[in-house]
Amino acid sequence: MVDGTLRNRGGSSIEPGIVEEFAAGLAGQVIQPFDTGYEAARRIWNAAIDRHPGLIVRCLGAADVIHAVKFARANDLLVSVRGGGHNVAGRALCDDGMVIDLSAMRGVFVDSKTRTVQVQGGATLGDLDRETHLHGLAVPTGVVSKTGVAGLTLGGGVGWLVRKYGLSCDNVIAFEVVTAAGDRLTASAEENPDLFWGLRGGGGNFGVVTSFRFQAHPVSMVLGGPLVHPRERAGEVLRYYRDFMTTAPEELTAYTALVTGPDGLPATVMFACWCGDPAEGERVLAPLRAFGPPLLDAIQPLPFPAMQQLLIPGFPDGSFNFWKASFVPALTDDVIDLVVERANRMQSPLSAVVIEFYGGAPGRVGPTASAFAQRHAEYNIGIIAQWTDPSGGAPHIAWARAMYDALESYSSGHHLLNFQSEAGNEVVKASFGDNYARLTEVKRKYDPQNFFSLNQNIPAAAA
Ligand SMILES: Cc1cc2nc3c(=O)[nH]c(=O)nc-3n(C[C@H](O)[C@H](O)[C@H](O)COP(=O)(O)OP(=O)(O)OC[C@H]3O[C@@H](n4cnc5c(N)ncnc54)[C@H](O)[C@@H]3O)c2cc1C
């Protein structure tokens, strides 16, 4: 029975006195099922996730994380790690075990001379953008500023700067990590390079990252926003988008989405973000803006943090979510026809299908240079089922699964693991490609007993 009682992995409950002793050694806070605040603390962005941890440990620094890891090991607790709480599969939470919650560790410290940024493990993209923007800088992350830096970066990280400056994980210079043994390590090209390799795309398998050091780039104002077309023209829009992006400069990242507009009508939206010279951006974007013409052209100069907030209304807190995604190497006419036909069957005005082109900087990093292997799978098709009725998930989940299955014959066989509500071992293995065997070796070295198990899990190689 799941009732939030703190139990070890064998099912025996932990004595309250032991928890009290642990709490006394913590700078942060413990939150238990009987505490005010427990209900809020066990909620994450995806309302479809309803887990009851036995103990939420809200850490204030690396020392608290070490204390929590040692306590969990000593008492054989199931552990999950919470960064920004946006993993759609709900991996931030567990039932009956311990949540190592970094949501109070959101510090961001910019060194403008070296254009580097130290970011704590519970920061959101918005926390990061707010501080870097003061210096005319930005770090490549994702497109919704409420998402956590940690989970996003550890799984790769794609966003509005991806074509010019690469994946989030490609921009990490160093990680500060607490391992399963409770040791604090630095992982960089010089120190523990095997761990550094694994953390750049290998997810939360190897430890708790208490802080990241990123390379930032000179991005302050961008030219960005949506171009809205009617849904009936989705096939034409997608073909135009595909052909346009083939020769578009890397300063431009653009996605296309099949959504329902605020007026309740199905629409096709191209979202563009140009991060280079503004006059050049106006010139490059002119044909994209003229095509159709669109029903609405809201592309305009924007501070980068504002660009990062544009999509927030599309992902309201408290909505119920189930996501799938597939990489396709080519956006052929057949794929486009399938995408449009399946998108037209979506069951909720909050649902969406997103087509994202990543060609550019990610492909200049070798597929084995870091754990993130999918360097040449250029289109990601995200299937986002989102609804508001707590008991009404079945048709939305069925729609997403059916579309994913229909796309499989066009897929490269790789999947963006951070976009998956469900991903079996075979999907995880295939998505890491040739890097999988090496990842199992890194797992054996840093977490041989799979202490960090609630993630895109990689087994330790046999001794
Ligand atoms: C609305 C929305 C928009 C998104 N947009 C994008 C996007 O544009 N680009 C993109 O690449 N992805 C995007 N994603 C996917 C996102 O990258 C993943 O959901 C990611 O897991 C979120 O990270 P988090 O820290 O918020 O998650 P959490 O749920 O807090 O954590 C997820 C998992 O990450 C690991 N983890 C978290 N923090 C740490 C830590 N400090 N140390 C070690 N492990 C940790 C753990 O395994 C944990 O279970 C989006 C997701 C949502 C919900």
Image (spheres, rainbow, N blue to C red):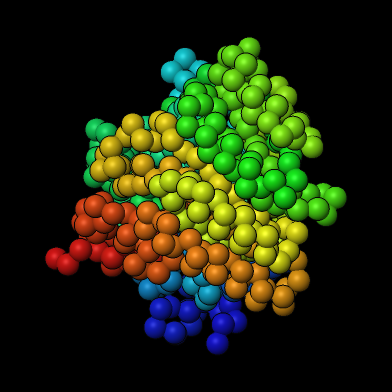
- Where's residue 385, x and y in %? 64, 62
Q: Is residue 256 left or right of residue 248?
A: right
User: Residue at image x 60%, y 82%?
Assistant: 3
**Residue 440's x, y, as percent?**
24, 59
- Name the one closer to the observer, 153 or 362: 362
- Of residues 52 and 202, the one drawn nearer to the viewer in this rendering: 202
Which residue, as the protein is rendered here, is positioned at the far left? 463
Residue at (67%, 65%) from the top-left corner? 345
Image quadrant containing the C terminus: bottom left
Residue 15: x and y, percent?
49, 79
Q: In this view, does 199 lie to the left or right of 384?
A: left
The residue drawn where x is 52% and y is 76% is 96
Q: Is residue 432 left or right of residue 139?
A: left
Location of residue 285 by image quarter = top right
Can residue 351 be seen here?
A: yes
Residue 455 figure quarter: bottom left
**Residue 427's quadrant in the figure?**
bottom left
Q: Is residue 99 above or below residue 362?
A: below
- Outermost residue toward the right in this view: 263
Q: Residue at x 62, y 60 (%)?
A: 341
- x, y percentage for residue 46? 64, 62
Q: Which is more toward the observer, 215 or 378? A: 378
Q: Which of 170 and 433 is in front in this view?
A: 433
Q: Is residue 166 visible?
A: no
Give left or right: position of 284 versus 66.
right
